[in-house]
Image (spheres, rainbow, N blue to C red):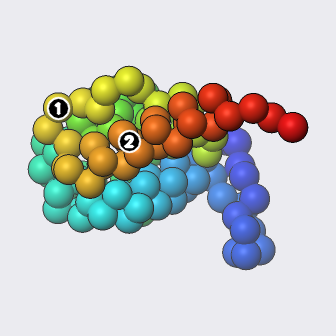
Amino acid sequence: MTTHSAAGKGGEETLTQAVARRLRGQLAELMISRKQFSELTGWDRMYVYRRLRGETAMDTAELEHIERTAGIAAHFLLTGNEPTPSPDPPPGLPNQLKTRRRNRRRVSSRTKDQPTG
């Protein structure tokens, strides 16, 4: 099993735990509660709880479902690297996520248009 160093824990973090940590971080950043996440995904609260704690590994179908329903990139959850944002957020997302995505695109386009040097 692949492990990643856990900053400040002095031990090793499994990929399952790293994915869970990244997902919890994204939910917190987007101000999506566990209850809201459960409702967005259509998953039972205990099902969500076990995955957010890193007790149960998520498969690729679950990661894709999270991306489709909550707008959190599967690529980011697996790698910790931000992918290029999709042009339009999926329908049904909380308003704060839609606003965040729009703002990110504006900043990215301004950065590309500015001359370097």
Q: In the image, is residue 44 above or below residue 74?
A: below
| Residue type (three-letter) at the residue carrying disc 2 | Arg
Q: Toward which corner of the image does residue 40 lie, by quadrant?
A: top left
Query: Mark 2 = which residue?
Result: 101
Whether residue 47 sits left or right of residue 74 in the image: it is left
Q: Residues within 10 Å of mark 1 (few under 14, many from 20)?
A: few
Q: Residue at x 71, y 49 (%)?
A: 3
> Element type at marker 1?
loop
Residue 91, numbered label? 1
Residue 32 spot, x, y in % from top left = 26, 60
Whether residue 26 sits left or right of residue 49 in the image: it is right
11 or 117: nearer the eye? 117
Residue 78 spot, x, y in % from top left = 56, 38
Q: Quadrant of the N terminus?
A: top right
Whether residue 21 sits left or right of residue 64 in the image: it is right
| Residue type (three-letter) at the residue carrying disc 1 | Pro
Q: In the image, is residue 5 above or below residue 87?
A: below
- How far apart in space, not on screen, are marks 1 and 2 (Cα)? 13 Å
Q: Residue at x 68, y 34 (%)?
A: 114
